[in-house]
Image (tube, rainbow, N blue to C red):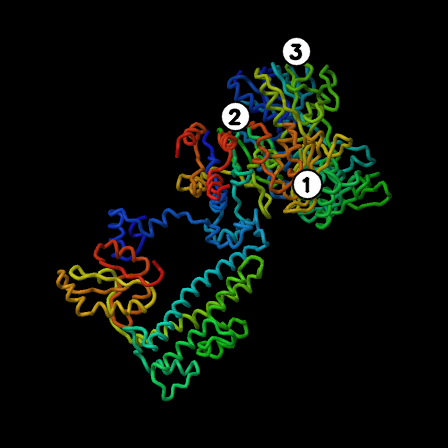
Amino acid sequence: MERSNGVKKTQLSKFKYAIMGNSAAGISCAETIRQKDKRSGIAVISDEPHLAYARCLLPNYIEGSFKKEDLPIRSADFYKSSGIDLILGKKVVEISEKNKNLTLDDKTKIEFDNLLIATGASPTIPQIQGVDKDGVLGLRTIADAESILKLLPSVDTVVVLGGGLVGTKAAYYLGKIGKKVKIVVKSPHILSQMCDARSAGIMSKEMEKNKIEILTQTDIAEIQGKEKIKSVKLDNGKTIDCQLLIVAKGVRPNMDFLKDTSVKIDRGIVVDRKMQTNIPAIYAAGDCAQGYDLLSGKNQAHAMWPNAVKQARIAAKNMVGEETLFEGAVGLNSLEYYGVAMVSAGWFRVEGPEYEELVQGHSIRSAYKKILLKDNKIAGFILVGDIHNAGLYLSLLRQKTDVAAFKGEILDYSFNYATAMDYLKDEEKSPSAERFRTTKESLIHEIYYSRIGG
Amino acid sequence: MKKLHVDIARCTGCRSCEIACALEHSKSKDIIQAIFESPLPRTRINIVGAPKKFYPLVCRRCEEPRCVDACIAGALVKEKDEIIFREERCVGCHSCILACPYSSISQRKDYSKVALCDLCKERETGKRACEEACPTRCVFYGEDKEFMEIINEPR
Amino acid sequence: MAAQKKSIDKATQQLSEKARKDGVSTAWDRLETQTPQCSFGEIGICCRNCFMGPCRIDPFGEKADKGVCGADADTIAARNFTRMIAGGASAHSDHGRDAALTLLETAQGKAQGYQIKDEEKLRATAELFGINTQGLAKEKIAQELAEKALAEFGKKEGELTFIKRAPEKTQKRWRAHGVVPRSIDREIVEVMHRTHMGVDQEYKNILSQGTRAALGDGWGGSMIATELQDILFGTPKPIRSKINLGVLKEDQVNVIVHGHEPILSEMIVLAASDKELLKLTQEKGAKGINLAGMCCTANEILMRHGIPVAGNFLQQEMAIVTGAVDAMVVDVQCV
């Protein structure tokens, strides 16, 4: 079977590795397989007609700082030179776990030895009257973005339903290009999945300063207009005139094509720590998967780019025979609006005697910092403003380090990797770090103290 | 892979490397002009302190870089064993800062994009800016093995 | 560093090569070991005034923007610069003090070899200080003038006497800004006081005091030195001479005077034409004593006696590198 770029003309093709999905997880898996297996056939199938692109940059594309040709994260040349067969614009309609093949919507059948399902997720569309009108859009694909761009010239007011990362990002960038924006969010504050009330308050304040209206504890009851959206009616009775409604109420894993299979699904495709489903040779990774959660030890769906990349890499390693376990996903979020950065990871909305909150309000360059400890181990943190220790806290969280010894200093500006290093395992070998550990005190210190006789 | 190593025993925490790095990545390359540039130049190497010791934080060129996994914009990529940061693509989301376990990616003042050590590829003199600036010559660029030899021989 | 980079002067280029071959270290070598020089120092944002430090401001605004006491970059730079002013003013002021003390001792007949050469200038300067010179002998005038000059260093109130020599408009401007110096040493002490930790954090005030101390130097110590030295050693007139290391002579005893104050170098000039010393020189096989000067003291004896100048401040080591200098006599500073 010759390796080439583009759609296969034959009715049946066989690949050692078939990958459903051409985004973070799909690409990560394909690349990793190719690094370790230089010869076998890899097919990447996507229902979108595009090269792998940075989905999270769609708001930037709408704003104009990224052009459409800047969105891809891999070039056409990448697929060609890596010997990856890219099949675009085709949906998988059936998977036969017995025969180890899948059928595309053009009746093509593809046989595989190993399959990775990395189909991602799609925006959850709430059941609201009028949700099928023109001008009601999600923001997940290039197609969504282009629909929005087409409408924009005639849009004065945008309503965003949902105050999460996607919703606030859309609001932020649309606000930047001069649209009137109103965010409708059911929770008491925006970003409720990513941070607490106080940090959300800091962000809302910035948004409101920049003329974005935020309506909390509100939902949309009805979408009004003829074929095109004209206004939305809120559950408190008020009406807002608008020409665009962006639905950002979360995503649902894409797994309908598995309904006639015996692949175990729950809120996502259930996988073990090797990213394998209950069917050997079928793996799943990314937004569609429900994998091992590091903090709870249970299976949970995580829709996060870095987790998708990592999970797919683990799947790939296991596919080529290198048994590896996934360390576990952690909820991760980071954003910056109007120059104020915010990152968060893990949990922050749990209670009980084993939990302890360490909080620091306004200090050197930082608006707010909070670490949630469970039995003296970091279970979650939120940083607003100065985020320079974010990576360090995440390491302590992942390694489940007991931080009792430095609980009092951990939120200080001067707390740093060097002071915490003795409590951390270095995952990346570094002779400098070794040198640091074996040196009791720096030479200049030695000299100084010996001179003053101390 | 060649990377930056620091002989911690000889670091005095003077921060000359920080200034040199920021200067190297400034537009004017002149200290007096650089402090008026916008955005302000940013060092990629950061000295932190521990009791009785100093520790320069700088990119370790990891085998499986977490920052590359985290980058949603494709600004941080691994190409042919090299970690490359394409500043034009950076959207300032800071996912990489959250991901890096060694605090090696720097947030910038009044500027969303981040800063990462690029091993001074553009430099004419062939030595990294921090290497040259260090008054105790404790910054070294090279392979792990070479560094181990240097610190084990009496200097 | 290549010789051409060290200096455009050919003599210096030649000698720096010789220095290199001789294994002699010069200022340029020491500069090389100092390079690159600390940028914090270059911008002046490092402070070591007290024990809560040393403090450094990050010029790129990321890390520390204030010292421990709260001083920001402007305060620290102002403190450092103003203390440098105090240093320079002190040097010049001590020089003036020395000139005044020498005049006093000369007037009292206690300084052998020194005399009052410019009586006209003596009278004019004394009048400026409010001394009625009618019918007074020059020694008496000189004594009173010297005492009045010495008083300028620590007087209780008022303005420095020489201030009234400045144009009216300039004086008015100084008074409006509050920078008229009151007494010489006092202004320098106030610089050290204001720039101390926890005293004056406002950089404009600090720089104002620096200005006042600088004026206390220019119109105080320096001017006293100039005028009194003219009185003691003669007011200079245009004169021709030679400069650069080529003034050294192969067949004479080369003596270089170096430093700042003619108090010593004037005596060396006298000694260089002393008959007995010249006889000794000839006995030892040299044709004579070749006196040359370097640095500011060179100017003093150049303008009054036409003594050639062997070179500038940067060339002082080069002079020694020639191997032709038999003695370098230094009075104060700049070595």
Residue C274: % across, % down: 20, 69
Q: Earlier in the sequence, mark 1 or mark 3?
A: 3
> In the figure, is residue B11 to the left or right of A290?
left
Disc ID at residue A369: 1
Q: Which residue is mark 3?
A: A99
Q: Residue furthest top?
A: A98
Q: Secondary structure at mark 2?
A: helix
* SS at mark 3 in the image: loop
The residues bearing labels 1 and 3 have C-alpha atoms spaced at a distance of 54 Å
Q: Position of residue B24 (x, y in %)?
A: 47, 45
Query: What chain does mark 1 sit on?
Result: A
Callout 2 amino acid: Lys
The picture places residue C15, in percent across and down from the top left corner, at: 25, 53
Question: How far is disc 1 from disc 2 in space, using C-alphas?
Answer: 47 Å
Chain letter belonging to callout 2: A
The amino acid pointed to by label 1 is: Lys
Q: Earlier in the sequence, mark 3 or mark 2?
A: 2
Q: Which residue is mark 2?
A: A80
Disc 3: host chain = A
Disc 1 and disc 3 in contact, CB within 8 angstroms: no
The answer to whether dots 1 and 2 both sit on one chain is yes
The secondary structure type at the circle numbered 1 is strand
In the rendered image, is residue A245 in sight? no
